[in-house]
Image (cartoon, grey):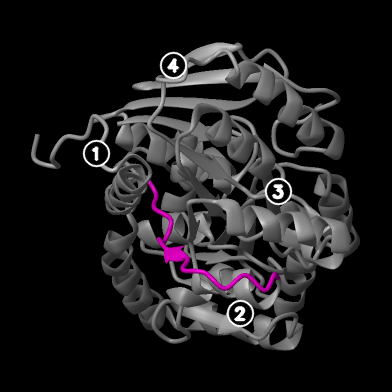
Amino acid sequence: MRILFCNYEYPPLGGGGGVVMAALARQLARRHEVTVLTSRAGDLLSEDRDGGVRVLRVPVFFRRELAVANFPSMAAYLPTGFFRGLRFSRNDFDVINTHFVVPTGPLGHALARWHDVPNVLSVHGGDLFDPSKGSSPHLHAPLRSAVRWMLRAADDVVGQSRDTVRHVTELYGVQRPVELIPLGIDRPPQVSAASRQDLGLPNDAFVMITIGRLVARKATVQLIDNFAASKIANAHLVIVGDGPDAPAVEKRATELGVRNRVHMLGQVSDAEKYAALSVSDAFVTASQHEGFGLVFLEAMAFGLPVLCYDRGGQTDFLVTGETGQVVKLNDQAAFVRALIELYQDHEARVRQGRHNRQLVENYFIDTCAARYEAIFSAAIERRAGTPKGLTSPSS
């Protein structure tokens, strides 16, 4: 197959949605011809290769941070992406996979109609519902109507969790089949050389780690409150990620007298992230909502129990007592109690970590890619009547 991915973000731009799409693209590029049309910021090249994936980046305006997009940059991606897409031949692609109905949806739909190929629309959660933002699409009638129209117009719609699939119907009133494909991650490499001293961590510390963009939805300031309230004397919190909330997080840690036990690593390489996971005892987050939660899977792959709130797609696979603790949203007292329990019950941490290593085997990218491959194939057959350039999985 010749596959075009449309996504306004692609690593190193953005967060989890771009990361998983990149992993999916690389996996499919082992057998198919894969191109990604995304946006460019900083000194990124307009055309590059990522493994077997051809990455085309179009210019956008006013984006200053790799980790966080803004409205002007998202809006600019639509016309610049469309004009770049017009340069493709009518026979360059068999299928388009559009990621994020907002903001990418209109671009993927327009290019699919222009080139007369099916459009498979992947919704990731925050593009339908983000409780931390007044700009969440479901809150605004014109935007809600546009999202509803694009959900109906796509040849197929894919959601990565029951939570996201439910929002298609409950928030947007779209009655149609939605494929549920859990997101997948690359299998993390074995880490052997990591040490706590490299991160400034005592050998006998109870180390918690959180990973994600420092934005309002992740509620990392609240996580600092919970961390301080636990009063675990030898607890340390490692924060991997950057974003506009970083100064507020640092300020709050200073105010509560725990700044010397909060380690803010900022944006790091995958190798540095894996090293930090390998020396940690538990993964914690106060995120207000996750469409799916790739970082949970990464933590589970390193045998860490997970502590989080109960809002989002992670409730598909996280269960209190089995994978860690899932606490009612913003019940900070219960969150602190769960922190203390994780610290005190070493046997439970070991048991949950062992369970998580086994469970995550169902969520690696090869499984996700095979599901997408089948959907692309079926969409192409429906549109053209016969498969276009397909090969059997065994070839």
Residue 40 visible: no
State whether residue 204 is above or below residue 26.
Answer: below
Q: Quadrant of residue 71?
A: top right
Q: Name the residue located 44 percent from the left edge and 16 percent from the top edge.
A: 49
Q: Name the residue located 87 percent from the left edge and 46 percent from the top edge.
A: 247
Q: Amino acid at mark 1?
A: Pro
Distance CA(mark 1)–CA(mark 3)? 30 Å
Q: Which residue is mark 4?
A: 49
Q: Amino acid at mark 3?
A: Val
Frontmost residue, 311 versus 210 = 311
Distance CA(mark 4)–CA(mark 2)? 38 Å
Q: Is residue 290 magenta?
A: no
Mark 4 packing: few (<14 Cα in 10 Å), some, or many (20+)? few
- Please give the label number shown on residue 102: 3
Where does the image place residue 128, in percent across and percent down from the top left? 69, 61
Q: Which residue is mark 1?
A: 387
